[in-house]
Image (spheres, grey):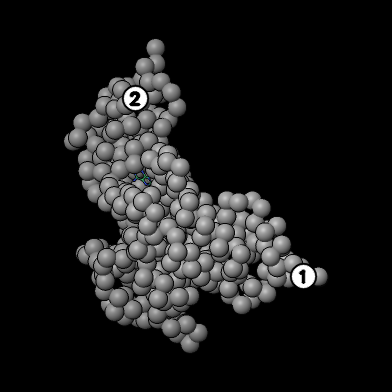
Amino acid sequence: MTQIEGLNPFTPGTGQLPPYLAGRENEQGRFRQILAKMSAGRSPAANMVMYGPRGMGKTVLLNWLIDEVEKTDTKDNSIRTSSATPNQLKNPAEIWGFLLSDEGWMEKLLSGETTAGFDAKVFFAKKWKEKSPTNKILLNTLISECKKNPLVFLLDEAHTMEPEQCHALLNISQQVQNEAPFLLVLAGTPGLAHFLTTVGASFVERSTKMGIARLDAQATADAIVKPLNEHGINIDDSTLAPVVEDSQHYPYFIQLWGEALWDLAKEKDLQKLTSQEIAEVETKIENRRSNFYEQRRATLDDLELLPAAVAIAALFQDTETTTRDYLKEIIADNLPADSLATQSVNEHLRTLIRHEFIWNPPDSILFEAGIPSLMKYVLDRQREHVQERSPTAE
Ligand SMILES: Nc1ncnc2c1ncn2[C@@H]1O[C@H](COP(=O)(O)OP(=O)(O)OP(=O)(O)O)[C@@H](O)[C@H]1O
Ligand SMILES: [Mg+2]
């Protein structure tokens, strides 16, 4: 008889809350403080810019925040959340649709603005061009809504914003925040930080920055073991140690491991996992991970940044962090001959950041590897390639 019941609880994929949200106590604490302030009717001191490489758990944290607001705030003046991605905010009308809870806002706008021949679409298009799709009536409506029910507006994938969209949101957030509790949370890949400085440098300086990085070893172990234990599946710390290491504390890989271990335990009807099962699962994980890496390597190749990536990967074999200047030197030494004519070293560096090969967390001036072990993969493939071309060479 099968002892292990139910569906696999692990969530390798995008944004789904994992069965055990591990290692984010600091981030959760910071958000709880902001919520408490807003709940008391006060504006947060600053907006939040959350960034980190793909698969680190940004969307999960946004989803946690929505749940947290719903769970803890049941008063009349409860906080409201609204969330979107930039592709849902293609024009000011859509932006206001996400910000205002009052569905009659369009009518209100029209009644305030209507003169003979007034056309809302033309009105908004003009505002968009002026980079200020604000309108006193809508702003005042949002301010009075926020005074009653503070708003947390979450924008995921914020690095894909167009400058116009970004200007519009920053403008609205600034005006509302002066008068009422309103929080804008922007979440995106490390390229978001640079994008924001190009759009509104002072906004980034004034925002709270939150880096979403890998977990620590204990949180990694907890993220795997706690859900397994809950389903009656046990694993010793020493058996788990190589799993924790192999996951590189990277949330996406942690879920891959958890899912595969759970499936195997269920299939074999095991209540205790041993090194034998770990070895079995490892091959499966390795295949999935190679596909994931190969896509990223192909992108670097398309961008003609593969030689630079290989050289950076070689450097990171012996270190966990490096400086911006050193990275720039390596990039300059490894670019195709004509490349610097069209793009500066800084731009190439930003491309590597945008593709998450490297990044620098907000609280550090040093750079670290973006997606862990992509570096090792890139290096291994390069060695294989060299071997294939000259099989006799050592
Ligand atoms: N703290 C955590 N503990 C355990 N698992 C987590 C944690 N955070 C995220 N995960 C898992 O990691 C994976 C990636 O999470 P998520 O989709 O939130 O990442 P992301 O940073 O938003 O990535 P992307 O930039 O691709 O959107 C998911 O499978 C999620 O369940
Ligand atoms: Mg995400």
Q: As displayed, is residue 369 above or below residue 13?
A: below
* Residue for point 41% across, 72% down: 203
Could you say where residue 119 lies in the image, as x and y percent from the top left?
76, 68
**89 left or right of 385 in image:** right
Q: Quadrant of residue 256?
A: top left
Kindly identify which residue carries mark 2.
231
In the foreground, 379 or 389 = 379
Instruction: Report whether the residue tagged 2 is closer than 8 Å to ligand 1.
Output: no
Q: Quadrant of the N terminus?
A: top left
* Residue for point 26% across, 74% down: 323
Q: As displayed, is residue 20 above or below residue 272?
A: below
In the foreground, 327 or 48 = 48
Could you say where residue 227 lies in the image, as x and y percent from the top left?
33, 32
Q: Is residue 341 visible to the viewer in this orientation of the structure? A: yes
* Residue for point 46% across, 71% down: 195
Could you say where residue 160 lies in the image, as x and y percent from the top left?
52, 64
The amino acid marked with disc number 2 is His
Q: What is the secondary structure assignment of the residue under circle 1?
A: loop
Mark 1 neighbour class, 10 Å CA radius: few under 14, some 14 to 19, many 20 or more: few
| Residue at the left extreme of this rendering | 238
Q: How many marks?
A: 2
Residues at marks 1 and 2, CA–CA distance in whole angstroms: 66 Å
Q: Which mark is residue 115?
A: 1
Could you say where residue 207 lies in the image, as x and y percent from the top left?
37, 67
In the foreground, 299 or 11 = 11
**290 left or right of 86 in image:** left
The amino acid marked with disc number 1 is Thr
Q: Quadrant of residue 367?
A: bottom left
